[in-house]
Amino acid sequence: MRELRKNPITGEWVIVSSSRSARPVLPENACPLCPGVLELEEDYDLAVFDNRFPSLVTDAYEPEIEFPILEKASAFGKCEVIMYTSKHDLAVPDMETKQLAKLIEVWCDRYRELSAMKDIKYIYVFENRGREVGATLDHAHGQLYAFPYLPPRIERKVEQTQQYYLSKESCSLCDAIKAMPEENTLKRGKYFISLVPPYARFPYECHIYPLRHVSYLTDLTADEKWELAEFIRDIAKRYDTLFKEKFPYMMMLFSAPYNTGELYDEFFHFHIEFNPPKRSRNKMKWMASVETGSWNFINPTSPEEVAKELREALD
């Protein structure tokens, strides 16, 4: 079974994806993402392939409606795996800027190709690093979900930034960058700023904002993409250095929506979020009842103190 079902209480879509193919049997310690093992027959630099276990597919069926109150829709979309490198033990903190810059170009390519599908409304690029966030494979890779609707948090970001723009006649993130306290800043470059935002939901949450107002990753120049590659590696390296381990995180890219009939250029500001699941090296930041049930986060740390820790990790 693979279909969308709408919650009549919240209005959010839930992806029901209970059909799973049998996982292939591999030799012990074999990595399916290494060249010649399973997913990719030959050596590669970077690569993209369809997820073997997708929640969204381009040939989705139209589900039957058994109950009038239960709205359903086809699970149309795309789920892809994005390989960062063929080298099994090479992760983002230790990658060369050139490799990460090529990764950004791959992301741009996927945005361009998938946004041409008129039923795709949002393209969500992310990386899960570590068992703590559900990653079952250590080989550096990310994923992509192309949705036929705007996910709830994206919808909220669009609504909030649009309301701010209509009220202030300016971009909320542009204004936030101008007013950002130095104690929250990790690094400021020619084109980007990285920070632990004063409004961080997770203890070691970090954001990357372009200093220039752009709504889509594809709007960046070549020089901006190069510096963005440096900033992505810098945050991942600060995590590993501070905690002296391969620190788990969720990295998420937020571009504006596509194919909605709306224009987002004036108020939606492209950004990247890193949300680690830990509050310290040995303690997890659990998504408990308050966060899960009310969507209200409680941050048990001071973002300013965390920023100081991360600054001192490398500086």
Image (cartoon, rainbow, N blue to C red):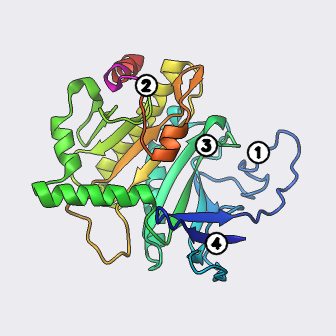
Location of residue 109 in the rendering, given as x and y in whole percent from the top left corner: 46, 64
Location of residue 299 (image quadrant): top left
Mark 4 or mark 1, whichever is nearer to me: 4
Q: Is residue 126 above or below residue 50?
A: above
Q: Position of residue 31 (x, y in %)?
A: 76, 45
Residue 286 shown left or right of residue 263 in the figure: right
> Which of 170 and 5 lies nearest the eye of the viewer?
5
Circle nearer the N terminus (1, 2): 1
Q: Position of residue 148 (x, y in %)?
A: 49, 72
Foreground mark, 4 or 3?
Answer: 4
The numbered disc on residue 163 is none
Report the Cα–Cα distance between label 2 and label 4: 37 Å
Magenta part of the chain: 301-305
Type of amino acid under label 4 = Glu
**Amino acid type, callout 1:** Cys
> Which of pointers 4 and 1 lies earlier in the amino acid sequence?
4
Residue carrying label 3: 140
Dominant secondary structure, magenta: helix
Residue with the mark numbered 2:
300
Which residue corresponds to mark 1? 31
Q: Tell me, yes or no, whether the two marked residues, 2 and 4, touch with CB atoms within 8 Å.
A: no
Q: Secondary structure at mark 3?
A: loop
Q: Residue at x 44, y 33 (%)?
A: 202
- How far apart are the two marked residues, 4 and 1, measured between alpha carbons? 30 Å
Q: Does dot 4 land on a helix, a strand or a loop?
A: strand
Quarter of the view holding residue 183:
top left
First-in-chain label (3 vs 2): 3
How crowded pointer 4 is (Cα within 10 Å; few <14, some 14-19, many 20+) is rated as many
Name the residue located 39 percent from the left edge and 46 percent from the top edge: 272
Whether pointer 3 and pointer 2 mark residues with C-beta atoms closer than 8 Å, the reply is no
Nearest to viewer (mark 3 / mark 2): 2
